[in-house]
Image (tube, grey):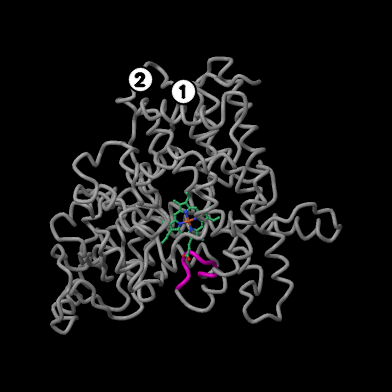
Amino acid sequence: MSLPWLPYFHPLLLLAALVFTLSSSFLLLLSHLKPATDGRKQPPGPPAWPVIGNLHLLGTLPHRSLQSLAKRYGPVMSLRLGQVPAVVISSPEAAELVLKTHDVVFSSRPRTRASESLSYGSKGMAFREYGPYWRSVRKLCTLQLLSASKVEMFGPIRREELRDAVESIKKSAAAREVVDVSEKVGEVIEGMIYRMILGRKRDDRFDVKGIVQETLSLAGAFNIADFLPFLGPFDIQGLTRRLEKNGKEIDEMLETIIKEHEEEQALQIREHKDFVDILLSYLDSHDDDQNPVKDRSNMKAILLDLISGAIDTSITVSLWVFSELLKNPRVMKKLQCELENVVGKTKLVEEVDLQRLTYLDMVIKETFRLHPVVPLLLPRVTMEDITINGYYIRKNSRVIVNVWAIGRDPKIWSDDVEAFYPERFMNSNVDLRGQDFQLTPFGSGRRGCPGMHLGLIAVKFVIAQLVHCFNWELPQSISPDELDMTEKFGLLITRANHLLALPSYCLAVN
Ligand code: HEM
């Protein structure tokens, strides 16, 4: 099985690392011979190699490798990732214990090189350890930035961005041109989120989507230095260099945008309040102890978490939905019929229509079951020793919840788990908002996604509009069965290749 970091190895550094590794392995091996659990029963797991433990078993698609291992070792499985003990959760019952019953113990995040470097020393929310600072950032974001009323307030922006996209796709349709759906959906969602958070139309000065994709890929990479810290100085995967470059680009972009907001505020020419304006107003009220926005670095870390949490997730989900619709023309047709019945052929979809689109809801759930875009949720770490399912898990263990494996478990979903069949959710109460542990694409509990409402609206609105306005065919006589669905693993599982399709406009209005 291939190693996920292999492409970044430099031969000389590899040699240096190897010498260091071999000389230290003997000592480490000795230390690992000591029982660390005082005889208490640890979850079963594969035998670990000296030094690297089970890192070599992760492969290039860790969600799939971990699923295979869990079939052998069970839904609560222990691994050793270098020097870090880890537990992998792969059943709804075990997920409920971790994300709900014992949520507090499992609600911290590990400090990693990526989180330190990208979040201004973990000053944001997503990678911050559990505690008063995280709580105050989370409260500010959920109440002041991502509440249902705030999300609704920015509805006109989403509408405008989507209408622009429809106009541009109409031109391609008239010219019988193939559309790069990945590019188009990326632009729309980037535009929606960028304007809401940073208050700018898409800005050619910065490649926000590119920067965020690199951030997420770095945050999701299994950095060997996090698991074998003595290899840190060698930077054998080249990740430290990439983190420094990415961090610099992020800082330049955010600093420029914040300065421009300050200048416009001083001249009193700001018409709408975006997230930068709201956070700037917190920056000015230093006196409040509960206020987490003490200086610019707090503010930038929070903005980065929101941009990176919002853009690529929503784009990736939309593209998996679209791919499944193209692959399953029966489902596409049925969804178009629902849209025709609910919205009609003479007008565009509006956000208020979304709540009446019940088949669309099923399509979204089925997509999340097969493609939970954050397949292993964000990593968590235990804050104290705990026993679950009779197994002892020690403090500071890394916790990985494999929601991807849970979505494909035949014991939960019957034998046709690989089939895309939205009707399995008909007359079912299973919801995706974090209460049903067989389907938790947004996580659950204290660390569950705070942007779920916004993410779901953006995805549903984009899909409903594009499917309502256009009929779509695969280009170059590719049959639906042949559509490429190759995955690429980072923090998110994205499509490895762009999705292309040929639109034809089908509404009765121009
Ligand atoms: C469809 C789109 C989205 C999906 C699938 C998604 C998924 C997730 C998942 C799985 C987690 C980790 C939960 C856990 O560890 O239990 C998470 C956390 C997070 N998400 Fe989302 N998300 C989406 C949209 C958004 C949006 C729109 C925002 C913000 C504007 C956002 C901001 C965050 C933040 C800040 C966290 C970290 C929360 C914490 O650690 O306290 N997400 N998301």
Q: Amino acid at mark 2?
A: Ile
Q: Is residue 467 magenta?
A: no
Residue that badge 1 annotates? 472
Front position in the image: 68 or 57: 68
| Quadrant of the image occupied by residue 398 | bottom left
Residue located 54% across and 46% down the image: 457
Q: Is residue 123 magenta?
A: yes
| Residue 62 horizontal/vertical position (percent) | 28, 52
Q: Quadrant where the C terminus lies?
A: top right
**Figure check: 508 above or below 238:** above
| Quadrant of the image occupied by residue 446 | bottom left
Q: Amino acid at mark 1?
A: Trp
Front position in the image: 471 or 343: 343
Front position in the image: 154 or 87: 154
**Figure check: 316 above or below 430:** above
**Figure check: 426 above or below 106:** above
Residue located 20% across and 61% down the image: 75
Label drawn at residue 478:
2
Q: Distance of mark 1 from mark 2, alpha carbons?
A: 12 Å
Whether pointer 1 and pointer 2 mark residues with C-beta atoms closer than 8 Å, the reply is no
Give the structural element (helix, strand or loop) at label 2: loop
